[in-house]
Image (cartoon, rainbow, N blue to C red):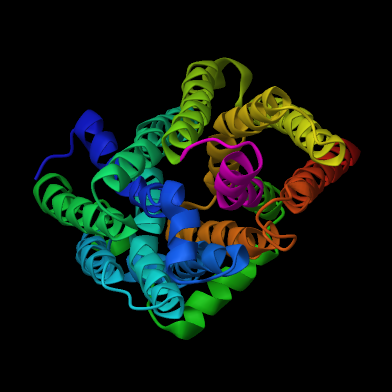
Amino acid sequence: MSQRPGRLLVVLGAVYALAPLAIDMYLPGLPALSRDFHASASQGQLTLTACLLGLGIGQLFAGPISDSRGRRPPLLVGMAAFAIASLVCALAPSIWALIALRFVEGLAGAIGMVIVLAIVRDSFDGHSAARAYALLILVSGVAPVVAPVLGAEILRLTSWRGVFIGLGIAGLALLLAVAWALAETLPVEARRPGGVGPALRTLGALLGDGRFMPFASSFALMFAAMFGYIAGSSFVLENIYGLSPQLYSVVFAANAAGLVAVAHIGGKLVARTGPLVLLRAGLLLSTLGAAGTLLCALTHGSLALALVSLAVLLAANGFNIPNSAGLALQDQGERAGSASALLGLGQFCLGAAAAPLVGLAGAHDMTPMAIVIGGCVATAVAIQTRHYLLSRGR
């Protein structure tokens, strides 16, 4: 089976998009879902937390497995499991059952997330890898643009349960696409020994790797800031500012489109500027967006201020996410699968922690969301500042 780079990136981007689909597609119906189960805003957001935890924990196992068994077989298993889990979510009888099922859905989706990043590392290097990561974000960015709009349209016809049926159908389609289009990218001679012991030793070595951790930390923190927005934005924009689910989905899609556009620009610029310059530019934009969001929360600012601040915050991740991932993985070689797993673990576990915090003050207060976002951005800036000062001192 030949590997065509263009077709490979399209399929990988679609697989990588399953996690944004699982996260974003049901967001317009999250307030209604909470009402249907007589659950609080924070309990409803636990359905997001559970999915994020599954995505993080699942990658911890999927990465080492892909390093020892190859990329293709576990990816096929992951696609099948995601489709089944999503369809079962549609049958959930209670909020707690849905929370448990979302965790399983996240575990299944994690396999695709980590293996896609490892396949990019197998297939590309140098600036071509950085461009591939940017293009991957660009392709997968179609999911958060389309997902809430599609979810809102499904809500016109049926309930939030129909959204999960749609996710199951998407999983089945991608299972067929992977089976048709994806060849194995990790030769047998390049595979690492399996088992818990070697996997833990590899992960321990990565935690002490100064070439990996500063960028992996920034990657996870900026995702956590975005998940704070994802978890809280439907309550803020629908309950506080009065947007309908359909109009909220349009705003969400516009913000996601901004992220995609900036990722595309970054992919064009990275060969000229290098990924580190783009990461620093992204963190500067994130700081501006987080500051505007906090100002809006503390002063009960206008809808316009809220929309502009959140748009800047999301767009900045078009620089932050692909470049921090590329910088973290660029020197990892045969540890790419395990490194991708550790990236995903930090990304989704921090996101899982952020998601319920934004609802602590109830469904009509955006201050917790602004504080969570601001804290994540400030910590990422501090880590990169320290890394810069240490590198200058060598």
> Quick check: 146 left or right of 59?
left
Residue 308 x/y as whole percent: 67, 24
Magenta-colored segment: predominant secondary structure? helix
Give the quadrant of residue 345.
bottom right
Classify the position of the C terminus by image quarter.
top right
Residue 103 in view in this figure? yes
Q: Residue at x 49, y 36 (%)?
A: 248
Residue 123 in view in this figure? no
**Residues in magenta?**
224-244
Classify the position of the N terminus by image quarter.
top left
Q: Residue at x 9, y 48 (%)?
A: 180
Q: Nearer the viewer, residue 98 or 363?
A: 363
> Quick check: 206 left or right of 76?
right
Q: Residue at x 52, y 24 (%)?
A: 258
Q: Nearer the viewer, residue 132 or 350?
A: 350
- In the rendered view, tell whether residue 3 sits above or below residue 37: above
Q: Residue at x 26, y 61 (%)?
A: 75
Residue 343 x/y as whole percent: 55, 56
Residue 205 x/y as whole percent: 63, 68
Is residue 230 rendered magenta in the image?
Answer: yes
Q: Nearer the viewer, residue 101 or 235?
A: 235
Is residue 177 rendered magenta in the image?
Answer: no
> Quick check: 113 left or right of 385?
left
- In the rendered view, tell whether residue 35 sits above or below residue 117: below
Residue 372 x/y as whole percent: 75, 52
Tally the marks. 0
> Quick check: 27 left or right of 84?
right
Give the quadrant of residue 112.
bottom left
- In the rendered view, tell whether residue 70 sits above or below residue 267: below
